[in-house]
Amino acid sequence: MEVYFAANPDVEIGNEEDNQYSYEWEPMDSTLFEISFLPEELVSLDMTENMGYACSSLYWKNAEVAVELIFFAELAENQLPADGTYTINDTYLPNTVMASPGGDDYFDYPSYLQTDFTEDENGDVWYNPYYIISGNVLITTDSEQGVTLLTMKASSYNGSTINLTFSTGETTAVEKVKLT
């Protein structure tokens, strides 16, 4: 269907060029990233109700890097997807992690790694994006310790390796002390 506007006859609606993502912002040099995050550096969001299908976002950030992964799975009580192996690909199937389609002039789309943050005189923050396109995420829980471990071994579009580890933290015993 084509639409013609008398007031703006040159406007094209749904121009496919507007919806093109690119990997052009990712650095060309292959780099090895060994990243670990603390429990307080995770923000998790279950988007299942809003999306109408199982979908969750895990976002970690510290002073050096940020990582966002989109899982096609609901979150468990520990704010991570259930134990299992999640393949990073572009199938959008249940129990997978979304491979990044790249970015555009405004955003980088998950899953990605952001590094080398700089702030310009206007307060805008710039960074190097690494678009995660393949690999696996493994989530395992040690029920005796009450600790869940997430490990990711992934590759970016230009061949960088991104290894990420995250633990929900060890449980500690609380000692009761009587004050006199």
Image: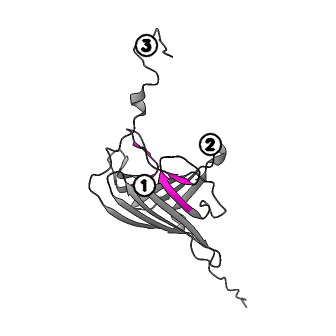
Q: Residues within 10 Å of mark 3 (few under 14, many from 20)?
A: few
Magenta region includes residue 98: yes
Q: How many marks?
A: 3
Q: Which residues are magenta?
A: 85-114
**Which label belongs to residue 8?**
3
Q: Position of residue 78 (x, y in %)?
A: 63, 64
Residue with the mark numbered 1: 134
Question: Secondary structure beneath disc 3?
Answer: loop
In this rendering, would 149 be left or right of 36? right
- The residue that appears at 46% across and 51% down in the rendered structure is 111
Name the residue rendered at 38%, 57% in the picture: 155
Separation of marks 3 and 2 at Cα, in angstroms: 34 Å
- Which three-letter amino acid code belongs to the residue tagged 3? Asn
Which quadrant would the C terminus be assigned to in this image?
A: bottom right
Compute the Cα span from label 1 to label 2.
23 Å
Look at the numbered discs 1 and 2 and tell me whether their residues touch, using CB distance below 8 Å. no
- Is 48 left, or right, of 42 in this rendering? right
Q: Amino acid at mark 1?
A: Ser
Image mark for residue 77: none
Q: Residue at x 57, y 51 (%)?
A: 72
| Label 1 Cα neighbours within 10 Å, binned few <14 / some 14-19 / many ≥20 | many
Asked whether the beta carbons under mark 3 and mark 1 sit within 8 Å of each other, the answer is no
SS state under label 2 = helix
**What amino acid type is highlighted by mark number 2?**
Met
Mark sitting on residue 51: 2
Provide residue 57's location: percent of width, then percent of height.
55, 52
Report how far apart the C-alphas of labels 3 and 1 lie in the structure.
43 Å
Horizontal and vertical percent for residue 162?
39, 61
Q: Quadrant of residue 140?
A: bottom right
For residue 82, side relative to residue 151 (left or right): right
The crowding category of the residue bearing disc 2, from other C-alpha atoms within 10 Å (few below 14, some 14 to 19, many at least 20), is few
